[in-house]
Amino acid sequence: HYWAHEGKGRGVSAQLWNIRDKIRDVDEIMTPARQATIGEAHPELVFWNLAGRVRLEPKTSAQGREQRVALLRARGFNKVERWLTLRHGTGIGRDDLIDACACAVAARDSTRRVGGEEIDPRGLRMEINY
């Protein structure tokens, strides 16, 4: 594990490394004007908000997964269980599908954000929507 060798906070997670090209693609087209309709979200922050700002069980546990699916169902995502069965053989991870649904909820319903006071060198607000 990288952090065990280099020290905590000294590297990036495997998940971040694996999506770095997608992040770069979005970053290349993002402008301050586009931030009015395109935002960044973090699924765990979305779920925390949907759950009434209480911490859920770990997403890798059966209970945590059930909590998240129930929260999504309450927001109109009634086919998550079916999508989870259809994903087999696609390379889509169970947690990834659930997280993507949470980000879709944030895209549709988000009225809250963390940050936004700091501006990066390109004029983009540094914020997370939830």
Image: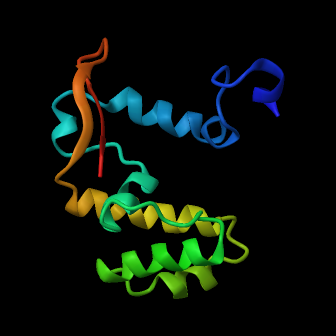
The residue most toward the top is: 121
**Residue 68 left/right relative to 103:** right
**Residue 104 left/right relative to 11:** left
Residue 44 image point, x, y percent = 45, 55
Q: Nearer the viewer, residue 99 or 89?
A: 99
Residue at horizontal 64%, vertical 29%?
12
**Residue 72 left/right relative to 98:** left
Quarter of the image holding residue 122? top left
Residue 33 image point, x, y percent = 15, 31
The residue most toward the front is: 54
Residue at horizontal 68%, vertical 25%?
8
Residue 91 image point, x, y percent = 69, 64
Quadrant the N terminus occupies: top right
Query: Is residue 24 depicted above or below 37 in this figure?
Result: above
Query: Is residue 11 depicted above or below 54 in this figure?
Result: above
- Identify the image's colour scheme: rainbow, by chain, secondary structure or one colour: rainbow
Q: Nearer the viewer, residue 72 or 89?
A: 72
Residue 99 image point, x, y percent = 49, 61
Residue at horizontal 62%, vertical 85%?
85
Looking at the rendered structure, the number of numbered marks drawn on it comes to 0
Residue at horizontal 58%, vertical 80%?
84
Query: Is residue 39 depicted above or below 5 in this figure?
Result: below
